[in-house]
Image: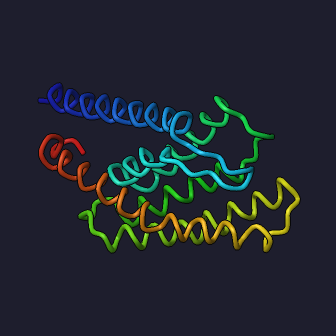
Amino acid sequence: MIQIIKSKKTNRLFLLSVIILFLGTVAFLLENLASVHIGPYIRVGLSSLPNRVVDYLLGPVVGASFGAIMNCIKYAARPEGAFFPGFMLSAATASFIYGLLLHNKPVHVLNIIVAEILVKLLVNCGLNTLWLSMCYGQDFFVLFPVRALTNLAELPFASVILYGLLKATEKVRTTKFKDIL
């Protein structure tokens, strides 16, 4: 009986490790193949979507850890300027917020919109603009309007894409992995 329990725990841990490694690889590839940099202040891409799946499936603590680690890996693979730990903190904070609002909850449009607004306002427009102003010596209030408009324009698209992705993830989770995830 004890060996069966250990076996189930080992299988669950192995499957979670495979999922995390797979999603990390997808995030890395999306960062390098599907991201557009518009000057030093704005980046548009899909590389955060695998992070959102980790946040949804595994919660805020694992999501924040995954976000911080992936931020370091992406930087190491494609450094742009000096490493600044604030961006790692931003990645962890965003993942924590998504995990807090989406983990163990049914995928619902309102939850996703609230999570998107909080992250875009607090992390993207707040923390990241602060970090950029510190790194590049630009005034926060000069950078803020452009970053706010960009995030506002991204909001509906990001919400629709995240909703579709998490709905698909929810379906797979409840049909294929209901005992594990």
Figure disc tally: 0
Colour treatment of the image: rainbow
In the displayed structure, 99 sits above or below 6; it is below
The image quadrant of residue 125 is: bottom right
Quarter of the image with the C terminus in it: top left
In the displayed structure, 22 sits above or below 103; it is above
Q: Residue drawn 32% across and 50% down? A: 57
Residue 71: % across, % down: 60, 42
- In the displayed orientation, state which residue is furthest to the right: 137
**Which of 37 and 78 lies nearest the eye of the viewer?**
37
Residue 60: % across, % down: 44, 56
In the displayed structure, 55 sits above or below 73; it is below
The image quadrant of residue 14 is: top left
Residue 12: % across, % down: 26, 34
Q: Residue drawn 49% across and 32% down? A: 29
Residue 117: % across, % down: 49, 72
Q: Residue drawn 66% across and 55% down? A: 42
Q: Is residue 127 left or right of residue 22?
A: right
Q: Is residue 35 left or right of residue 136?
A: left
Quarter of the image with the N terminus in it: top left
